[in-house]
Image: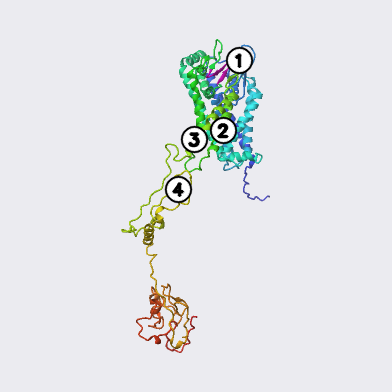
Amino acid sequence: MTEATDHPPAPVQGGRTAALAGACVRGALAAGLGLGSVTVLVMVVWISSPYPDSGPGGALHVAAALWLLLHGAELVRPATLTGAPAPVGVVPLLLVALPVWLVYRTARDAAEPGHDRPRPTAGGAVCAVTGGYLLVAAAALAYGTGGPLPSRPLAAALHLPPLVALAAAAGVWTAHGRPTGPLPAWVPGRIRVGLARSRTAVAVRAAGVGLAVLLGGGALLVAVSLVWHAGAARESLLSLSGVWSGRTALLLLAAALVPNAAVWGAAYGLGPGFLLGTGAAVTPLGAASLGVTGPPPFPLLAAVPAAGPGTWAHWTVAVVPVAAGAAVGWTCGGRGREGAAPGPGPRDAAVAALAAALLVGAAVAVLAAASGGPLGTGRLSAFGPVWWSAGGAAVAWTAGLGVPVAPALRAWRRREGGPPGVPAPPGPVAVAAPDPVAGPAPVPPQEPAGPHEALGPQRPAPEDDPGDPAFEPYDFLPAAWEDPVAREARWSALKEASGGLMTAFPPTPVAGPAAPEGGERVEGDVPDEGGVRDESGVRDDGARQCGPPPPGPSGDAPTDGAWEGRAPGRDVPGHDVPGAHVPGAGASRAGGPDPADSRAPGDRAAPGDVPEAPDTGAPEPPRRP
């Protein structure tokens, strides 16, 4: 027979390995969610199409290929008129936001600690989420190989891992509070010092503003051109499809390509323009001829200017890069936020503007490369802006305008008074001297003013700015402080506000000790150089004393009613000797003989004498030295 014992179940706690495994599963789920969303969209278009080319299997293969295209993987269209496979590499940038956002949210959630799981490391979370996502991408790549739009494995391997890793790193960085340092130890010291400076943050903010102005201006150019060529855009839409499902699909594709069109418009405004085929450049100076057929029929391509030299209407697009350069200069040379540290000097503002121009150029180059690509072979092998020319033009425009504008604006704002609309620094405030006849104003007794309030209004200290006209070294006190009348009024106000704590005590002469007759020293008398000492040894020099008098001959202190509110040396009856009189008290207070004492000067007792108590047979208590 075995003995049954009750043991509590051991708690199972997941370690970092379990957390990394959960992050990997989360990455796979994010990839599946994005793939499922694209699949639903493709299946809806396939169902609504009156003449589908293939069955549901073909639609699923197309969905997997389009999902890979959203990550930058180039597709191949094998069925062409010439029989040669044609690449399809133009990626709709609007749809790229879907997988990027899914990876970002998944990595952020995986990096945050939960109630039942620990927090994985930053590198572990990025690798786990990226690995789980790429597993699903590899399966989709293998599945789409036998479809009508297979993806090139090399292109998928070059584009998917960097995009997914960057999105996951951004999510983990957000989960850790978006820290800006410290940088790893392998980063060179000069780079770490340069990135830690305040002008680096100013440059990043200015680059964001300049890039937003460029893209916004490009989108505005495309919208204006589409409105101008609305008829051509409508004809292209109607000619491509005769049913509502096909036209709806075309409109959805055009909407997904709107960010691409904004980048193309920004490149057109910068000057290099874009390509609509090999050797067919479209710039503000002129558009090359595209042959008899013209550009491919598509609603967005209807906004392309006609072939021929440019006119003044085309040259007005230069306002877009001018606005971007001015925005960069204004941001770098602008005044800091309220309560923040003073803005950089003109030199730092120029350096920040140059750094912002480089960042804008890099961003434009990346967007130009991502917004274009091939749409076939031959003349259709190059579509969109050339990344290096667009990036270089962005650097030239923003640096050429931002670098001179930023230091000039900073120097202007550092001048006296600042630009229009900025309030001038406060000047000196005059302090009115009080009327010496009327005297200081009475202070309400219920709310006595403190020392600072009693001094009255004071002029604020001048700013530490040498450009301020009110700036004077060591001028930290009001001018009225040196006025004798004002100084006496201030002291009177302080005295009134103190509530009687600054009572004026008139000087009184100090009486010396009374000499005994015959020059003999009386027992208990302690001579001193000034004033009179009582029998406790405390000198009485005429000042008011606080505290109880010394104990009587019996050693007991008098009652509260006997000494409360009295000064030592007054006629205070003793505790056990009624009517005891301490001689010399009047002399110690007034500085002379007591007028109530009618005895002759020679008969008066010394200040230290105490009248003897009647003999009761008990031993006399010891006297206090």
**How many marks overall?**
4
Crowding at dot 1, Cα within 10 Å, few <14 / some 14-19 / many 20+, comes out as some
Indicate the quadrant where residue 64 lies: top right
- Mark 4 and 3 residues: CB-CB less than 8 Å, in contact? no
| Separation (CA) of disc 2 from disc 1 | 38 Å
Comes first in the chain, label 2 or label 1: 2
**Residue numbers of the magenta segment:** 273-285
**In magenta segment, residue 281:** yes
| Separation (CA) of disc 2 from disc 3 | 15 Å
Q: Which residue is mark 3?
A: 409
**In magenta segment, residue 568:** no
Comes first in the chain, label 1 or label 4: 1
- Mark 1 and 3 residues: CB-CB less than 8 Å, in contact? no
Q: Nearer the viewer, residue 99 or 624?
A: 624
Q: Which residue is mark 4?
A: 462
Image: 354 above or below 513? above
Q: Please, what secondary structure does the residue beneath circle 3 have?
A: helix
Q: Amino acid at mark 3?
A: Leu
